Structures are given as structure tokens and as C-alpha cells.
Amino acid sequence: MSRKLLETDGLEWVQQGIVTEAQRAQLLALYPEERPAIGLLPLLGSLLILLSALSLVAANWQSLPETVRLGLLLGSLAGTYAGAEYFLRRQYDSLGMGLVGLGLMLFGLSIILTSQMYQLIGYDLTGLVAWAVAGVALTWVYRSRFLFILTVAIGGIVQGYNTGQLGAFSYLTAVLTAGGLGYYWWRRPDSLLGAVLATGLLWQTALLVSHLHIKITWFFGPAMLIYALGDWQEDRPAGRAMQGPPLVAAFLFTLGLALFGESDTYTGELRPPLLAYLGVLGAVLALSLWGKQRRGRLGSATDWLLLLPGFYLPGGLPLAIATLVVLYAYSGAVLWRAHQERNQDRVTLGTVLFILTTAVAYFKLTWGFMDKSLFFLLGGSLLLGLSWFLRRRAAHTFSSSETPAQP
Amino acid sequence: MNAPSPSAPERGAAATRHPPLPKPHRQRWLLWLVGAQLLFVLAVAAAGYATGRFGSVVLLRTTPVDPRDLRFSDYVELNYTISLLPGHLWKGSTLPRRKDPVYIVLEPRAGVFEAVAVYPERPETAQGQTVLRGWVADTWRRSMRLRYGLERYYVPEETRRKLRRQQPLQVHISVAPWGQARISQVEVLPALRPR
């Protein structure tokens, strides 16, 4: 709920007798007022002047003496942070935080431009790692979600640049993003930040796997470690949000295995050394189960169904069918749990997964030999019937629940 | 997966559990942080300046550079004559592998430096020789491609004007006593005559 909603609708609630005037005032006091935004015109005016200065500098950058260039970079960096602090002190929170973000971007730009000036680009990774360090430190100082997200993005960009352009992976950046921001999220659990951080870390993991030229299935070692972190988080919604991206990756991978698992060349590409892989995954599984047990969430252990290493079986139709069974078991478990918990969002999610699995299964098992018009007719009816049944089931669950949710 | 986000009062409660830094505390931290950022940028500049000032200079030739590359970017990719070396220069006991760091011993031959040996560890050098650090980019049966981190050159306006056709460059590399190397100067050589 926002202050804006309270301000606009609150009077109506008082008139309808839902809350008293005193309660409305109490509610309003929960959401302290932000200072009104600075007028649009002065802001636009200063932005235009800034742009003109920027274009003047950019056009003459090469011909400026090195000391002037360095002075300009350092001056604008310090000036932006000073401006940010000026506005934050006067309670212009959004503008202040925006300027802190701009300062962080300017720091990265200064490193890059200074390195260019002395032709140092491409020699080592320290420069850009410092950028990520600054992002993590600023996030901690300001306790800001915006800076958190910006730093995740910077970590991803730095790592992408390192692997893509310099042909090296910066383990320091990975450890910093995972450790610095992970600990921040651990102490201040938040759903959005959990999902963003998990996505950023998965991106870095993917870059590492492609950089090392190892089997792509190794991706799931770190990915499930992120998942296990979600199990240990006390705040349930934040933990689930952290587990979302690894689960999406695992589900898509299993879906791919069901579709292409028939060809042995594809599955051959997926097989890491058996004992090492199972050892790593087993260790992460134990960690995850321990966390689930400690937090009383053992029911969600079915998520691990997606990690069954079916690709070690010889490729062929049996493998595809076994994978489909796993997918059904997983999406069925999601649906069943959602009904148990009477959670509308998760029922929708489970329904989508179930229907997706059915579509893939149907395509896989019938495309080869069935007449195409019959294929589409039967497939359509199957999906319609399934969606009708699942929706009826959901309606039944929620109508019998004590606190009926809106369908 | 679509976990509902905590509602505002919950978040408020979380914020009181971990309150933001008190203002004087925050400002002290911020001063340190901004100071460190400014110092870091200065340090990058100082490293670049010191390498040029105190380093020994090595002259390298490149294969011809195409000025058309500059239409879409402000840098060119340089391909040095020492980027592709014959395998017999390798002095290691095992075969070189991709991404391995290597040390290249350079010696002046007719004004330009040429590679005389490639080692897996930093070797002792004779008078007049210089060691450049590089990485193995690729290996073949009789040759190897090396990467020095000096392949990208941001072309200043002046050099850009001189570069009219596909012309080779003569590159001055400063190698600092502590091993850092950077391009310090670039001359455009006359175009090779078409055979």
C-alpha cells in the first residue's frame, strides 16, 4: 500500500465507516511523506545544460590534455556524490539515490576512460573489479534496493566483458557479488532482490561454464547452491524468490531433455564424470534438505525431482518418457502443494507447468505417427479439457477455504 | 516461484530490525568510499604514466591495419609480427596449452624487436633483451598464437588522419620494471607495395 492510495481513498473509507479519522491519520503516519519532487522545468533545464556540457567535452575529449581529462573525470565523480548527499539531506530521496547511482556509473566510466587514455585496456581485470566493489560498498552504506539491483547488473556486465573481451573469468567479482550482496539479502530479506540476485549469479555461473568449456550440466552445482541458500532463509517469500530462477533453469533444462533426449549425441554432451557430478549435487542436496528440515519446509523437497540426472541413461525414447514422467511428477507436486497451502498464485503456476508438460508430452509422443489434423484436434481438446479440470479443482479448493480468495 | 512480496508494514518491520546507518556514520563511510574511488582512478592514471615514464621501450611491427575498422569504433585490433610464433621457440618441457601465461624474450633485430624464445616461467635475460608477458591464445602443430593484452589501440585523431590505406604500424611498447606493459606511441608506416 502506498501513501498516495491512502491519501486519495482514505477519506472515502472514513465516510463509509471502514476506518475512523484517527485510524486514517495513524495509517498515514506509517508512510512518511517524501518531499515533493523538484519542479519538472528546472530539472529539465539543468539536464539540457548538462547535456550540452557533455557533448562539448565528448567532442573535444581526444584533444584535451591528459591532466584536464583526468580532472574532469575526478571532478564530476566527486561533484555527483556531493550533490547526492546534498539532496538526501534535504529529504529528496529519489533524486539523491538517483545521483548516487549516477556517481557509481561515473566511477566505472572514469576507470574505462582513464585506462583508454593510457592504453591500459585489456591488460588486467582489477580495474573493473573495483567497480563492482564500489557498488557493493555503496549498497551497504545506503541500504538501497536500487543500488543493489544496479550492482547486480554491474557485476554481470563486468563478468561478461571479462569473459567476452579479455578471455578471463574474474572469480573475485563472482565471490564479491555472491558474498557482499548475498549477505545483504540474508540480513534484509526481500523478494525482488532475491530474484534479481539469483538471476545475476546464474548469469555469472553460465559465463563461467562456457569460459571453462565444461559440460553445461555443471551449471546446476552453483545454481542449486543458490537454491539451497533460499532454503536456509528464514523469510519464506524472500527464500522462494531466490529459488525461482534456479528452478526455472532446471525446469527448462528438463523440458529440453524431454524434447531432445532421444538423440544420444545430445545426451552425450551433458554427461560430466558420474561420481564427481553426483558427489557435488548430493552435497548440495544434503545442504538443501537440512535447511528445509530446519525451517519446516520439507514438503518442497519435490523441487529436487528436476535435478534427477536422467541424462546418464542411454538416449532414446525411454529416456524421453522417463523425463516426461519426472516433469509430470514435479508439476503435479507443485499443484498439489499449492492446493494444500491454498495459494492462488502457486495454483496458477502449477497449472501452467502442468499444461506445458502435457503439451510437450503430446508433441513428443504423437507428432511422428499421427495424422496432423487429428494431432491438432486431439491436442486442442486435451489441453482444453485439462485446463477445465484444473480450474474446477482450483475453484473447489478456494470455495471450501475458510478465507475465500477471489478467483 | 511467484512468491508474493511482503506488504509495506512487513517491510517496515524488517527495516526497523536492520535500520539504515545513522547519518553521521553514513557520511563518514561515504567520505571514505568516494575518496577511495577518486584514489583508484588516480592510481590507474599513475600506473599508466609511470609505465610510460620508467619503462624500457620495445618497438614492434604490426600487420597492415584497415582504416575502415575505425568507421564504427574508436579503436583498431592490432596483430603484431610476434603474435604468431613458430613452435620451435617454445622452451617449456610440456606442450603449451590455451590460456597458459607465457614469457616472451625479445631481441632487437634491425631496429625492430623480434621474439627469440618463449618460456613458461620468467627467464633470465641477456644484455639488450626484454621480456614481455603474454598468454597462449591458440596452438597448432608448428605454431602458436599469443595474446599480449596490447591488441586494442584507441586511435587518437592525429594518427587517424595519417592512416589512409591499409598500412602497418610501428608500435612503441613501454615495459615497466614490474612487468606492466602499455602502448606508449604509434607510428604509421608506409603501405606495403602490392605484389
Image (tube, coloured by chain):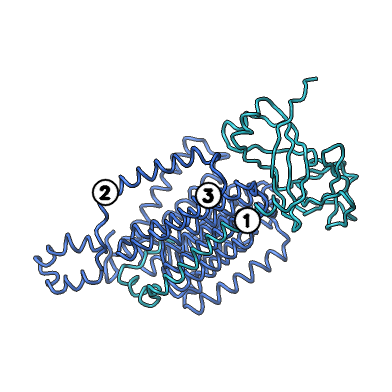
Q: CA distance from mark 3 to mark 1?
A: 63 Å
What amino acid is found at the position of numbered circle 1 in the picture? Ala
Residue A179: quarter of image: bottom right
From the image, which quarter does the N terminus of chain A lie in?
Answer: bottom left
Name the foreground residue: A272 vs A69: A69
What amino acid is found at the position of numbered circle 3 in the picture? Ala
Crowding near the residue tagged with mark 3, few <14, some 14–19, many ≥20 C-alpha atoms within 10 Å: many
Name the foreground residue: A407 vs A332: A407
Which chain is drawn using cyan? B
The hue of chain A in the figure is blue
Q: CA distance from mark 2 to mark 3?
A: 56 Å
Q: CA distance from mark 2 to mark 1?
A: 42 Å
Mark 2 and mark 3 on one chain: yes
Q: Position of residue B2 (x, y in %)?
A: 41, 60
What residue is shown at x 47% (from left), y 57% (from top)? Answer: A104
Helix, strand or loop under label 1? helix
Q: Is residue A76 left or right of residue A394?
A: right
Q: Earlier in the sequence, mark 2 or mark 3?
A: 2
Label 3 resides on the chain identified as A
Q: Nearer the viewer, mark 2 or mark 1?
A: 1
Location of mark 2 (residue): A40
Crowding near the residue tagged with mark 2, few <14, some 14–19, many ≥20 C-alpha atoms within 10 Å: few
Residue A239 visible (yes or no): no
Q: Which mark is residue A361?
A: 3
Q: Position of residue A163 (x, y in %)?
A: 64, 51
From the image, which quarter does the C terminus of chain A lie in?
Answer: bottom left
Residue B172: quarter of image: top right
Location of mark 1 (residue): B46
